[in-house]
Image (cartoon, rainbow, N blue to C red):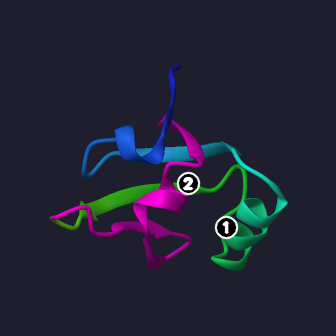
Amino acid sequence: MVNNNLLQVQVGETVRIRSFEGGKSTVSKLRQYGLFIGDVARVVRYAPFNGPVLIEVNGREIALGRGIAVHIIVEVV
């Protein structure tokens, strides 16, 4: 199993969140989004021109800026 950050995953792939990188504020922000270690997510799309990443997790879609998405470490399921 190879761990990548969320930006290294292809559209349509399903991943499991393994960890979060960054400080307490980054981890807190990701938890506010409702993302937790062990969650299974699917990358729906990458917006053009360095726009947000749209993921589906726990039955809902979340748009994450690329600056925060890079801190989410995942493994392809």
Q: Residue furthest left?
A: 48
Name the residue rendered at 25%, 61% in the picture. 50
- Count of numbered badges drawn on the protein: 2
Label 1: few (<14), some or many (≥20) within 10 Å? some
| Residue 65 on the magenta segment | yes
Q: Position of residue 49 (x, y in %)?
A: 17, 64
Q: Secondary structure at mark 1?
A: helix
14 vs 35, left or right, is left
Residue ID for mark 2: 40
Image: 12 above or below 65: above
**For residue 9, which quarter of the picture?**
top left
Label 2: few (<14), some or many (≥20) within 10 Å? some
Q: Earlier in the sequence, mark 2 or mark 1?
A: 1
> Is mark 2 in CB contact (under 8 Å) with mark 1?
no
Image: 15 above or below 4: below
Task: Name the amino acid, label 2.
Answer: Val
- Given this view, does label 2 or label 1 mark the residue nearer the observer? 1
Image: 11 above or below 29: above
Mark 2 vs mark 1, CA separation in Å? 14 Å
Which span is picked out in magenta?
A: 49-77
Name the residue rendered at 72%, 49% in the picture. 22
Q: Secondary structure at mark 2?
A: strand
Q: Position of residue 31 (x, y in %)?
A: 73, 70
Q: Position of residue 8 (x, y in %)?
A: 36, 38
Q: Position of residue 42 (x, y in %)?
A: 40, 57
Name the residue rendered at 55%, 54% in the picture. 40
Task: Name the amino acid, label 1.
Answer: Leu
Residue ID for mark 1: 30
